[in-house]
Image (spheres, rainbow, N blue to C red):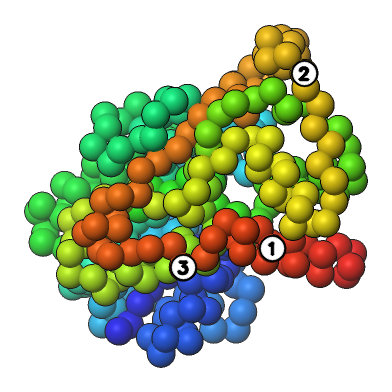
């Protein structure tokens, strides 16, 4: 099939396009700025973006990855209007143009954060939405607009809500954590008893491909993850093992960590660090027969291998 991938030069986009090409699909790479000669430059994403140059070639399916994301905890709570312009209005504008050009299926990669943060029990797909920041709100609003467009036009919409994505090319807090562990810096996480879901890049790409072809995916929303939940200290230990390092975890009282976060003006970031955020992926297993093809151990080893290669070049 002919598949249009937006955000094709991003973390997920590059991996997805490579996988689709290997599967002999015809891929159109839509990007904001070109990094390869075959990229199609669309420019900024908003409610006025013209997608005709990529939609006029009989596109069967679209995977919409492009958007504005907070790359670090410090980026939360800023530029709320920009999140809405790009993630909400830009997505709705794009989807309507897709429907007008006869696109059959539209896959939107949202975020588990539309359901909220800090719940001890695993999030279920039918939980009420409680987005806690401007980024999550923009994604939730986009989901609602997409469902409306689907109802009006008949275009099949599939929504995926992944947790934190890691893998070769990862940036932000996960990369910072890897660097910290690699340097042997003490981490005050020894007493944290939360549970977090993550998804390895290869697993996310595989889930997207399942949603591209499975007839049962049409009109559905799915939570996806590695299927393994870990606490923050356990994640540190697993990364350290993959790096062949000794984890340096210090048992600092949770109350002191919270106080430090308040004093440093990073209360929200610390709360996310301490809280749980895990998901139940039973529905996607049962309805699509999707099983994560990679374990978390395999995903972390691949990420560390990439990290070592980049570090050697630097």
Alpha carbons under labels 3 and 2: distance apart: 36 Å
Residues tagged 2 and 1 counted as in contact (Cβ below 8 A): no
Q: Position of residue 110 (x, y in %)?
A: 39, 48
Question: Which residue does the numbered mark 1 point to in the structure image?
Answer: 301
Q: Quadrant of residue 116?
A: top left
Give the SS element for disc 3. loop
Question: Which residue does the numbered mark 3 point to in the structure image?
Answer: 293
Query: Residue at position x 56%, y 71% from top?
Result: 14
Query: Total number of numbered labels?
Result: 3
Residue 252's label in the rendered image is: 2
Badge 3, how many Cα within 10 Å: few under 14, some, many 20+? some
Q: Is residue 178 visible?
A: yes
Q: Position of residue 234 (x, y in %)?
A: 66, 40
Query: Residue at position x 74%, y 57% from top?
Result: 242
Q: Is residue 95 visible?
A: no
User: Seen in the image, is 103 located left or right of residue 209?
Assistant: left
Q: Is residue 279 above or below residue 130?
A: below
User: Seen in the image, is 37 located left or right of residue 98?
Assistant: right
Closer to the N terminus: mark 3 or mark 2?
A: 2
Q: Is residue 284 above or below residue 183?
A: below
Query: Residue at position x 9%, y 53% from top?
Result: 152
User: Seen in the image, is 109 located left or right of residue 82?
Assistant: left
Closer to the N terminus: mark 2 or mark 1?
A: 2
């Amino acid at each position: 099939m002919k598949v249009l991938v937006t955000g094709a030069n991003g973390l997920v986009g590059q991996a997805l396009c490579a996988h689709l090409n290997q599967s002999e699909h015809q891929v159109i790479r839509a990007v904001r700025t070109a990094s390869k000669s075959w990229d199609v430059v669309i420019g900024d994403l908003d409610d006025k973006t013209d997608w005709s140059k990529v939609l006029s070639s009989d596109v069967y399916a679209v995977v919409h990855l492009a958007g504005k994301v907070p790359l670090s905890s410090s980026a939360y709570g800023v530029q709320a209007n920009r999140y809405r312009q790009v993630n909400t209005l830009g997505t709705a504008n794009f989807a309507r143009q897709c429907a007008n050009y006869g696109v059959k299926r539209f896959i939107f990669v949202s975020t588990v954060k539309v359901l909220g943060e800090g719940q001890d029990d695993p999030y279920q797909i039918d939980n009420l939405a409680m987005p806690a920041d401007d980024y999550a709100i923009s994604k939730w609003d986009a989901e609602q607009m997409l469902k409306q467009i689907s109802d009006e036009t008949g275009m099949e919409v599939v929504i995926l809500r992944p947790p934190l994505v890691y893998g070769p090319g990862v940036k932000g807090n996960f990369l910072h954590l890897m660097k910290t562990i690699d340097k042997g810096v003490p981490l005050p996480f020894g007493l944290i008893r939360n549970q977090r879901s993550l998804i390895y890049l290869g697993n996310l790409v595989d889930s997207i491909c399942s949603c591209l072809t499975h007839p049962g995916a049409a009109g559905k929303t799915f939570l996806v993850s590695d299927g393994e939940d870990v606490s923050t200290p356990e994640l540190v230990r697993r990364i350290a093992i993959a790096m062949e390092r000794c984890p340096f975890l210090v048992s600092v009282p949770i109350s002191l960590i919270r106080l430090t976060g308040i004093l440093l003006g990073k209360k929200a970031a610390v709360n996310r660090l301490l809280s749980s955020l895990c998901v139940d992926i039973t529905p996607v297993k049962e309805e699509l027969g999707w099983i994560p093809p990679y374990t978390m151990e395999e995903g972390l080893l691949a990420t560390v291998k990439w990290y070592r290669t980049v570090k050697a070049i630097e």
